[in-house]
Image (tube, coloured by chain):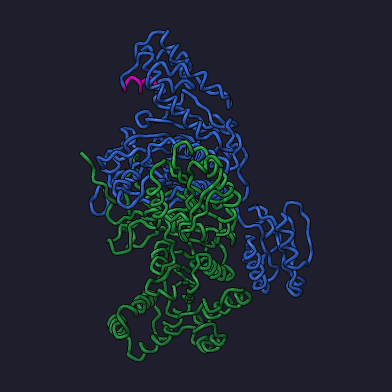
Chain colours: A blue, B green
Amino acid sequence: MLVVPRTLSGFKDRLPKEAMAKEKLLNKVSKVFQSFGFVPIETPHLEYADILIKQGSDEIQKELYAFKDHGGRDVALRFDQTVPLARFISQYHNEVDLPFKRYVIGNVFRGERAQRGRYREFTQCDFDFIGSNSIVCDAEIVEVIYASMESLGIEEFTIWLNHREILNGICKYFGIVEKSNIETTLRIIDKLDKIGKDGVCIELKKELNMTEKKIQGLLEATNIKQIGASDDFFEEIAPMKQWNEELKKGIEELEKMYEILSNLEMDRDTYRINFSIARGLGYYTGIVYETTLNRLKSLGSVCSGGRYDDLTRTFSKEKLSGVGASIGIDRLLAGLEELGLLSNKSTNARILISCMHEAYFSYARALAESFRRSNVNTEVYPEATKLKKQFSYAHSKGHEFVVVIGEDEYISKTITIKNMTSGMQLDRLSFLKILEIIKEG
Amino acid sequence: MLVVPRTLSGFKDRLPKEAMAKEKLLNKVSKVFQSFGFVPIETPHLEYADILIKQGSDEIQKELYAFKDHGGRDVALRFDQTVPLARFISQYHNEVDLPFKRYVIGNVFRGERAQRGRYREFTQCDFDFIGSNSIVCDAEIVEVIYASMESLGIEEFTIWLNHREILNGICKYFGIVEKSNIETTLRIIDKLDKIGKDGVCIELKKELNMTEKKIQGLLEATNIKQIGASDDFFEEIAPMKQWNEELKKGIEELEKMYEILSNLEMDRDTYRINFSIARGLGYYTGIVYETTLNRLKSLGSVCSGGRYDDLTRTFSKEKLSGVGASIGIDRLLAGLEELGLLSNKSTNARILISCMHEAYFSYARALAESFRRSNVNTEVYPEATKLKKQFSYAHSKGHEFVVVIGEDEYISKTITIKNMTSGMQLDRLSFLKILEIIKEG
């Protein structure tokens, strides 16, 4: 009886073209992380269930893949990379230096209801700065996001910045002081794009019994955002520092961060303050980040994060704060595809070598070895089948050149090459001449 | 109540030094795979249990992490990368071109009894050539193993080659013809290193009722191996081709492969025929491979594989043969560590920039940005703490240089740098001068 080959419901396979594109993105961002001194760690995909259960939200508990292992232990697949980081730091605090800058690229699992474009296993790409309260770390996160986007060839993006104290301060100013009420308020405001201004008003009235006037004030305040790289922005919002201590603190920290970033070559138009950015409500305590692609805002944030207090509270009494962000690499991949920024190739080999007879393979392999030693990725078609079939293979995978070895080439130890884009063919040239042509493009 | 931070029993964390080393190895080998035209695919860590259960051996069934997901589906974590490949090829046969060359780097899970140096989650690093019977593919596997070892800086290694038909032929010659008896024989011979020649004799007598003379002949034949790159080897074993068709076929295919490899720059001493290499008994049908480090033979094979028939038999009636191998990256990592070939660094940043006062951070960050734009990975210590603490951080992580920014440097926009290896310090030089020094080493 044959088994029907099928992918587990809610999960995803990637064909070579997409898998290659993803691998390239991941390589690029990990190089960026490393260039700032972030280092990788590795933790298992499986953890004791109690390690994960304590820290997750209720929502996440429901989505946890939990089961008993062979030894009857309660185990679960990780649902994020932050809880394993907290466990790791608590466990190895004697072996890692603080501040600890770690990045991690790995898959996490959430048994969410299947939705278009959302899968139950996805890749997280996190970088965090643990154990320092310095605003220099918060500034570095902006730099890393900028450098990551740049490395991926994305030119038009915006890093949106806010501070949780600014949101607390605005809420307080309009009479919302209890933590749970602040969270309710932010959750409702977060729906602005979905339910519109009127919808937000109705919900705020209903849930918090706010007056129309306060709601208007609240919406106006959270609607403040920096337009371009105007230096006047901090002047414009300066009066709000008088509203309360929270707003003063939040705005001053952003000012300090802007000062640290001021001498960089980074395009100052790309990072902007936006008082509506809230992010993971209970979690963040300081500056928060979101990143959108200017030409594809509907995609949502492709890199988000913020500063948090007390990372290791479940495991240790020692308080460790941190700041970090996560690149949503699967979402980004979908976005780049939509913008036509992904390569159409299904191979990283530039040359395909075709043999017209089996006897030529030993020459073909030596030739391929020489190309590879000259850093030109080269594949040899392993059968001496019809040239038409071999050319169609190269065409479909995206090789730039096909080298054909017939009797003449074999005897004279020369190379005949066809440029698959221009269609131009050059006959019986030397290896060095061909190498020159290929290296030129 | 605090949760005790602990790693799941049988699983492993990696601190930055080790995680960095592993990532580097994986980057290097994936570049090699790509240079030969292998392409990556991605499949989920979780599969429907029936996909995995049919193909695995009984041993593996016991070790399978299987459970019910939120929708009540029977699911399991993959135990290798070959079954998912078979499922993938069967499912997407209309979308991939044959021959299909895929590589994959990912983790697999086996609930084995915990042993020293063996973990229940480990990384597999497979490359396979599917859908071609050409011996050119088998030859390429040798080249890929060679190039991988070379890329990892391993100079002394041996790729051991054999052919399953040679083993079948030797067994047949000594009167063992039934498949199950051949498998028993090979399993016993495989224990030679463990139980010695006498132990092997006793077991062969007991299990197969063989005569002393036949056992001696069998052991002598399977003990044949190529010593160095001698061209006489095929002449020496030529008479065995007369023993039976199986031996003839096996030896001739190896001869053909050697012919294909003959013009390469590869050191011919590194690949050798060894009639005792068996590998995964029921699985392989043609040429098989093992790779050992000459200076650490006790480590066992770090890259093994072979040719197999009918990869997709569980899923499809179409017969697809293939040849491939798998680098045991965790084992290799342990071996390189033992041989002292791993870096001691816990960072990829070459420079650490230290500020003596908070006011200098904006200059420090701009300097770091300039270094990074010149491809020199540079980290800024995020706090203006005591220099001693910052130097000790650099020392422990392995930065090559520390740049110190004090008042003089800040005002004159110069750089004072200390070489952490030589101890040499250079005061107040320009960025370009420093860049020159750093690029020199």
Number of numbered discs overlaid on the protein picture: 0
Residue drawn at x 45%, y 45% as measured from the top left: B354
Q: Quadrant of residue A85?
A: top left
> Is residue B384 highlighted in magenta?
no
Magenta-drawn segment: A179-185
- Of residues B280 and A370, which is closer to you in this image? A370
The correct choice, above or below, for B237 with respect to A36 in the image is: below
Q: Position of residue B223 (x, y in %)?
A: 42, 84
Q: Position of residue B14 (x, y in %)?
A: 36, 54
- Of residues A440 and B46, which is closer to you in this image? A440
The correct choice, above or below, for A228 with respect to A310 in the image is: above
Q: Position of residue A44 (x, y in %)?
A: 35, 51
Residue drawn at x 34%, y 47% as measured from the top left: B74
Q: Quadrant of residue B336?
A: bottom left
- Of residues B52 and B264, which is closer to you in this image? B264
Point out the image quarter for the C terminus of chain A. bottom right
Residue drawn at x 49%, y 25% as measured from the top left: A274
The correct choice, above or below, for B260 with respect to A436 in the image is: below
Q: Is residue A9 visible?
A: no
Point out the image quarter for the N terminus of chain A. bottom left
Residue drawn at x 43%, y 19% as measured from the top left: A241
Q: Main secondary structure of the magenta part?
A: helix
In this view, the residue farthest toward the left is: B1
